[in-house]
Amino acid sequence: MNEDSDSQLRYVTMVDEIVKACTEMSKTYTGAIMLLERSTKLSELLKQENVVRLDSSVTNSMLQSIFYKGSPMHDGALLIREGRIIAARCHVPLSETFHMIERYGTRHRAAVGASEIGDTVAVVVSEERGTISVAVDGTLYEMKDGNDLRKNLFYLLGLSASPSKLAIRGKVKKHNKKNTNSKKKTKVAVATASNEPVTAFSVAESLRDAADDQRDDETLPIVARRKKKAKTEKRARNALLFLISFLFSIMLWMYIQVTTNPVTERTFTLQLQYENAQVLEEKNLATQYPMQLVTVRIVGRKSVMDSLTASDLSAYLDLSNVNSTGSVRLKVNVKCDENVYFRVTMQRPEEVPVSVYTLESED
């Protein structure tokens, strides 16, 4: 536990010293570039011929003496590992990003190039403009002032100088920011559930928390804001691409169906059949069964129509709804024994007259 506290204190002190040095060097237009290692080690830079090996604490005076314009170590980058300076005059491969070539000089391109190698954080001071910038993940972010630099370095290095929300706010909002207006309701609900009285003070506190949530985008470091915006835009692009892909797949499927399996029609002549005759007998009724042919035209996909035969289809009259004697007209139904989809476009006849009589009259 003490080792973690000492390590965090060392990094917090390092950030403060870097901020002081960069602020003063920006006023005097002194160029500088510092590489802060995280998990990716830049050991290949230590093998360069002109590199100067060091083992020093990160202090304002040390940084300014290294990047002093008359210093032999002024050119090149400073390498910081685990809160200590381990090398100076390191030459970093330049970024080949087009907009970097157009807008910035060698130091900024080297800073972006170093951040492209891994998760290195590069801090650069412009000799021409006196601006302070941070490069991370291949992107350059210009800082407004020293406080902005400190806030972004704390965010990138996972530090917290005091028990505030600054260092962890990005992670908290990632999981909890479902609705900025819901925090007030949640807090009041928690107080009620725990049998605590909802006072004017608790409501005011909830309102302040809601206002803090609305100001999150302003208080977040610029790196976090840009990453948050890029992540939101990426999700929107992915959703749009998914929708376009889905629609394209449907259109492609429909095109294949139309071209390779078009809709065709066939005509069949079927023998009329009678169903549920036993129901008619239970009602003490009977009917004649005239031999009659039914012509039907059906429409379906070509693959289905080609395999369909007259024996797969049947045309029938349903006698279960006949309840009295006399002449009735029954609808001709068409069905298929196979589980296939088709549509009847024509059938002749559509209805058949049937004479119904009682069984006693037959005797």
Image (cartoon, rainbow, N blue to C red):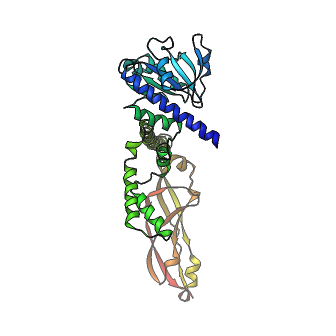
Residue 265 is situated, as x and y percent measured from the top left of the image, at: 47, 50
| Left or right of 5, for residue 257 | left
- Tell me what residue is drawn at x 55 percent, y 30 percent: 119
Instruction: Give the quarter of the image for residue 48.
Output: top right
Give above or below for 249 relative to 26.
Answer: below
Instruction: Give the quarter of the image for residue 139.
Output: top left
Label total for image:
0
- Tell me what residue is drawn at x 48 percent, y 27 percent: 138
Residue 227 is situated, as x and y percent measured from the top left of the image, at: 45, 37
| Left or right of 10, for residue 347 | left
Residue 112 is situated, as x and y percent measured from the top left of the image, at: 47, 24
Q: Nearer the viewer, residue 231 or 357?
A: 231
Please, which residue is most extreme toward the left here?
Answer: 129
Q: Nearer the viewer, residue 38 or 12?
A: 12
- Tell me what residue is drawn at x 36 percent, y 23 percent: 27
| Left or right of 295, for residue 48 | right
